[in-house]
């Protein structure tokens, strides 16, 4: 696929353009087209760009299969509209269309009044999206994991650790506690597990006597660092307090732990939770089955179930308790809406009151039966 000014670099695997990358022309001057393209490609996260590339590949396969001539880039609105109709899900169609739009803009080499990108947003494309939406199946969403489910995983890990002989505890027993801590942190801090929890190192966490501070290098759609603070709730329920559990994990496995990975401590850049997103989901479902959920039910949960579960618990007050105000729920989720942040930053009373909210959820959940064991 060639653009009007340059050959578009179609890479199978993306890496962000490095500042040291040579973007000069043969005569030694900087190529403005290459500089613009590099700036556009580096303006999104790697995971987002990977999704956009998947959308671009989907469009390419459609053109090859249907023998659609693609002699220029950006493509025509008519070709893109025909491609969108072939996609089953509305959410997928929207995301893939954003990817094609993104690369259409990147391939231009510059952006000004004389060379505006084709935004691929005419009436044909809007009509195609509406048609896909009408026939799209319901969205596949991870089921919210309530506090009872998180507590069951914590209790199982604590039981594994306490029942082991203190003189011969294995690394596997310590890792069970570490995984349970990751689950609790994802629930308590409303983290996106793959991009926020699993990337944490010891340098990202600071523990004080009353609070845990987690520094996130980047949140979704927010490139600057974010500090998430959660208070100690040991007086309410020590088992569900992420402060002391994180402190336990930061100390590393005890020296008596037997296992090939037993290091006896953590360095500055040690990953706290060295799991992949796929292995985390697999293990989460396995732990839920071990605590009473059926296999069919456990398959409905994934890493996002933790963030969704805590938000659902706060919104509903645990199902029966006092509901949290909307501003508090948005604070808990760490929303990046500029209008919302502008609203709360002008009101000091809108700081997150996490302990008060979780207390209502805990009292409600403590009086209920585990969902997997309800008659």
Image: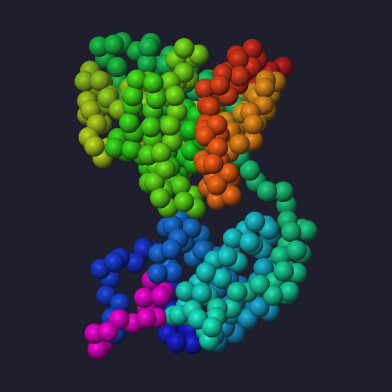
- The quadrant holding residue 43 is bottom left
Q: Is residue 82 above or below residue 257?
A: below
Is residue 186 positioned above or below 3 on the image? above
Residue lying at 43% horizontally and 20% vertically, measured from the top left: 232
Q: Nearer the viewer, residue 233 or 306?
A: 233
Residue at (46%, 51%) from the top-left corner? 222
Q: Is residue 28 magenta?
A: yes
Query: Residue placed at 29% from the left, 17% from the top?
Result: 169
Q: Is residue 221 visible?
A: yes
273 left or right, relative to 264: right
Percent of width and height locating residue 241: 45, 20
The region drawn magenta spans: 26-38
Question: How many marks are shown on the rendered structure?
Answer: 0
Identify whether 53 is placed above or below 368: below
Q: Position of residue 111 (x, y in %)?
A: 49, 79
Q: Quadrant of the C terminus?
A: top right
- Residue 177 visible from this viewpoint: no
In screen coordinates, is 287 left or right of 68?
Answer: left
Q: Which residue is pictured at 76% across the width and 64% down the height?
A: 131
Which of the pair 166/8 is nearer the observer? 8
């Amino acid at each position: 696929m060639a653009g009007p000014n340059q050959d578009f670099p179609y890479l199978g695997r993306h890496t962000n353009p490095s500042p040291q990358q040579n973007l000069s022309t043969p005569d030694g001057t900087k190529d403005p087209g290459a500089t613009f393209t590099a700036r556009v490609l580096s303006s999104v996260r790697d995971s987002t760009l990977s999704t956009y590339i998947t959308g671009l590949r989907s469009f390419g396969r459609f053109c090859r299969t249907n023998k659609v001539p693609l002699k220029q880039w950006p493509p025509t609105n008519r070709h893109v509209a025909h491609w969108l109709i072939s996609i089953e899900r509305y959410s997928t169609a929207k995301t893939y269309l954003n990817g094609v739009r993104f690369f259409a803009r990147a391939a231009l080499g510059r952006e000004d009044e004389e060379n505006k990108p084709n935004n691929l947003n005419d009436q044909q494309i809007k009509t195609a999206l509406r048609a896909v939406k009408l026939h799209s199946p319901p969205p596949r969403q991870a089921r919210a994991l309530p506090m009872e489910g998180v507590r069951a995983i914590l209790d199982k890990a604590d039981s594994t650790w306490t029942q082991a002989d203190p003189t011969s505890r294995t690394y596997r027993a310590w890792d069970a506690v570490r995984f349970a801590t990751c689950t609790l942190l994802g629930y308590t801090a409303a983290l996106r597990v793959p991009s926020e929890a699993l990337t944490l190192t010891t340098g990202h966490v600071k523990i004080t006597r009353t609070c845990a501070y987690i520094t996130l290098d980047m949140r979704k759609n927010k490139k600057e660092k974010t500090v998430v603070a959660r208070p100690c709730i040991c007086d309410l329920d020590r088992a569900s307090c992420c402060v002391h559990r994180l402190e336990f994990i930061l100390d590393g496995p005890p020296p008596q732990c037997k296992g090939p990975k037993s290091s006896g401590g953590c360095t500055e850049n040690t990953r706290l939770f060295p799991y992949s997103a796929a292995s985390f989901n697999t293990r989460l479902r396995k732990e839920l089955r071990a605590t009473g959920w059926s296999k069919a039910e456990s398959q409905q949960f994934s890493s996002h179930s933790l963030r969704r579960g805590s938000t659902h618990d706060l919104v509903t007050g645990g199902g029966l308790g006092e509901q949290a105000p909307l501003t508090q729920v948005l604070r808990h989720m760490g929303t990046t809406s500029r209008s919302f942040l502008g609203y709360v930053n002008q009101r000091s009373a809108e700081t997150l009151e996490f302990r008060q909210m979780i207390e209502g959820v805990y009292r409600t959940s403590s009086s209920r039966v585990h969902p997997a064991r309800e008659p």
